[in-house]
Amino acid sequence: MNTLTRTCFVALFSHWRRNPLQLITFLTGLAIATALWSGVQAINSEARASYDAAAATLDEGQFDQLLASDGNGVALSTYIMLRRNGWQVSPVIEGRLGEVRIIGIDPLTAPGSLTGVELNEQVSLNSFLGKGAVLTHPETTSVLSGKAFEQLEIVTNRNIAPKLAFTDISVAQRLLGQSDFSRLIVSNMQPLKRPDLSSIAPQLLLQRATQSADLGELTDSFHLNLTAFGLLSFAVGIFIVHGAIGLAFEQRRGTIRTLRALGVPLRRLTTLVACEILSLAFLGAMIGIALGYFVAAALLPDVAATLRGLYGADVTGQLSLRPEWWASGLAIAMLGAALAMAGKLFSIARMPVLASPRPRAWAIATGNTRRWQAASALLLAVLALALLAYGSGLTVGFMLQGCLLTAAALMLPLLLDRILSFIQNRSNGVVSHWFWADTRQQLPGLSLALMALLLAVAANIGVSTMVSSFRLTFVEFLDQRLAPELYINVQNEEQSKAMDRALSQNARETIVIMSERAEVAGLPVELEAMRVGATHRQDWKLLEGQTDAWDSLEGGSGVLANEQFVRRAGLWTGDDVELPNGSKVEVVGIVGDYGNPLGQLYISEKLFLDLFPDRFPLRFGARTDDPKALRETLNAEVGVPTSAMTDQAAVKEFSLQVFERTFTVTAALNVLTLSVAGFAMLMSLLTLADLRVPQLAPVWALGLTRRQLGRLELLRALALAATVCLLALPLGLALAWILLAIVNVEAFGWRLPMFLFPWDYTKLWFYAFCAALLAACWPALRLARTPPNALLKVFANER
Amino acid sequence: MLKLSNVEKSFAGNDGLIPVLKGVSLAIDAGESVALTGESGSGKSTLLHIAAGLEIADQGEVVIDDQELSGLSESDRAQVRREKIGVVFQQFNLIPSLNVSANIAFQARLNSSFDAQYVQHLAESFGLQDQLNSFPETLSGGQQQRVAIARSLAARPKFILADEPTGNLDETTAASVLDEMLELVAKTSAGLLMVTHSNTVAARMKRGLHLSGGHLA
């Protein structure tokens, strides 16, 4: 580095040394923005890695399987018979030991990619078969303890899904205490000729590999939601960075002029400024990535619970450092800082060397800037309308949100100026007139922070409206679906028949729970058997349905479909669907189905048994006024253990728990976004404080005390925050509507009714108000304590 | 030698181009001090900026030490300014984030001619030895201008171009600052071109030039 460069760097960096608050603002803004973004990315990449591990290790999605139609295991003799007849099948034993899913495989016959881990990578085939090795995720090892595992070699591998353990089939038989196989995996490589399954093993069902929906696809919408939140938080953080960079540039106009006058070439100067900002951005980004790790680590358990609850996807609860997320955090932070800096660098490049050195800092909202803002806002609003009218798809939903939020943010300073002008014109007292005029003057300097506050409050209103609407609908939905007071599981056909008989005598009504996966209208669906009774007719609310819907269903001429299925299939009430046996039935009604991503068709029990004659219910629901007595009766009459019977209250509580955790992440991000907005406001007010002295000194000299000025500063921040909060309401409700009517439909396949929650909004306003109050306290206190000689210097022209 | 030959400069106005300098020529030798006077708006500062390479003349030549400025790139002009010219502005133009010592040494450091003893000597000559660690905002106007002049001298330039350096100061302070400045300029044998409104200041220079109607008299 030559002397010129070094000397310039010293001069440029000296600004930050003299203005540590600006440096803190810049670094903190970027660190927070990066933390939220990279935190979300960390969660997403961890979850995706878990899906990849699951896809590589869970066989359901990859291979066809043979299952016993009676729900019991597959006998060894059946397996041998199939092998002898040329069927390339491999046995699997599966069961749970505590919270760990044990999968026993036969490595000699299993398809190569079944475990996702090549055996010879870490453990030899001899060791796997001989000593008995257990392959598992590092996180799961702590759970695999106890006597049963003493003789076994535990081998860890991060490519295996969490809470899953692979071992040899004989070891699994011993660990799980079962001899029959859970299923047979059908290899993709089969001989050209082999006997039909129905002729040699009619008791087995072939389940196609493609019947289960892909986990990654199912959870994409969830991750997109998280990403959108991360991006919103990042945008709010970048507002802070933009403000800090803008202020630093404006305050250094004089220095830049002097440097050029003293002989520093323009190109060198712009390069040095860019290097300076980018090196600070790098520092901020690294801090942010470190913080992001902690954010992700704190949120990951809730995300894991959400994904397990909504999609049945097991995601590791521990975070590992993955290059993709910290690299993306670093990249977006540098890009954000570069974007925030680009305009300022351009203005330096265009600034005449003899331009006025006085900081224009917060007088930037010239007529041109305002016109540009209004035009951009209008353009984005038109684009939003066009997307609303002609667009479709999840991405369009998020683009619509982006356009709406950006347009509103750009319009905010203009709108506030009009409002303040209106108030100013109607204020009578000389102090109040000055106060409102002065507030208008402060708008350009505060506009970025106010935009951040607008976005944060609007996002909070939007998301809380969606969540609360979802909560109301979901609780009502649970009340409908979990109407039976008691749920009973049975083991076999004999028990099933006995239970049905016993329930018909002892319960007010019997609900059968029986389903089969199939393909209807080209989509995977679950066909649900329904024994139509009073519970269905009275409690189930149809989103839309024919008047005789229940009669049609009971008679077998009609089916009910869940909302996600009809939306995906492009069907509606009155349309026909073709069932797997080729018969056509009419969709007579649509039911809301929240918390389940799969398409479902409800058909009469009789029609179900016509389609699947070998099936029988393994689960029942019972309507009763005395669940305890019924439980004892069923235990005595059918011999079903009480542990196989579950109270409705327990099921409902579990479902609600899963649901509540689902939105913990969203709520946490909401709070973080609001905190970032409060921080943006604090930093804007603090950096403005120094520039305010020349504006306030004359008012002080004319008779207002410093304490009064401090109080007025506080009042100003609160007045602006209150106005922004009010303006955020319609924006937040529009956001909620987009989330409920567009994003949810595209992401989950259901549309929720929108409810309003005035009390929640009032609480939110209160929090935002508190954030603004906290942000304004320190600057106001500093102003109230400004030494008189600092104010007097304004008149001495010696500042 | 600093030599301007037939320099012309116009600025855009509402009614088209307004000529400010109409073929101005002047020459200043090393060790010579020249006062440039004229009414407000007569183009004095423009002439000074053109001489410093801060602005480009529409026509004519500016030669400093046998180097013609108008043919040089922005970067090369900056180098000439850095190495051969010291500029003093009416508004001081100190770097607010650097202390007095760093401000004085700044240009000298830029062109690798920093001499700590000389900087110390300049500070003492201008009575700034007790303020070396202070920041500009804590100094009076007179002290700030002393720092600016010391900065321009610290790099040992061949020419000092000063734009009303005492214009913001009271009469007593202005006289004192001017005395110190002229004494040190004389010691360094630098050429001095000073724009001023004050006849008293102009009278202290070896030669006086008056700019009027775009011409020197």
Image: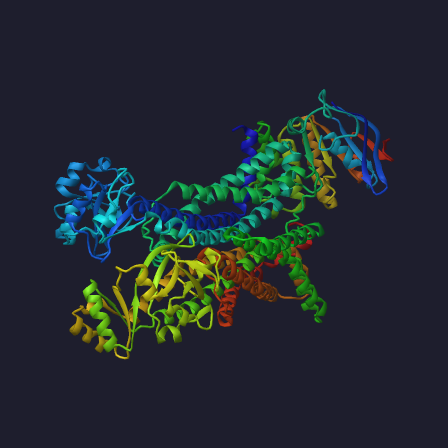
Q: Relative to residue A6, is residue A315 drawn left or right? A: left
Residue A452, x across and y down, in percent:
55, 56
Left/right of residue B132 with respect to residue A179 in the rendered view: right
Residue A339 showing in the rendered view: yes
The image shows residue B148 at horizontal and vertical percentages of 65, 38
Q: Nearer the viewer, residue A571 or B154?
A: A571
Q: Position of residue B79 (x, y in %)?
A: 64, 27
Applied colour scheme? rainbow
Q: Is residue B127 visible?
A: no
Q: Nearer the viewer, residue A565 or A130?
A: A565
Which residue sits at x=15%, y=40%? A129
Image quadrant in which the N terminus of chain B is located: top right
Q: Position of residue A693 (x, y in %)?
A: 63, 56
Q: Judge from the rendering whether residue A533 lies leftward or rightward of residue A614; answer left or right.
A: right
Q: Residue furthest top?
A: B66
Q: Quadrant of residue A510?
A: bottom left
**Number of marks:** 0
Quadrant containing the C terminus of chain B is top right
Which residue extends farthest bottom? A625
Position above or below: B44 against A509: above
Could you say which is closer to the camera, residue A393 or residue A754? A393
Q: Name the residue nearer the viewer: A354 or A325.
A: A325
Q: In the figure, A709 relative to A690: above or below?
A: below
Quarter where residue B183 is shown: top right
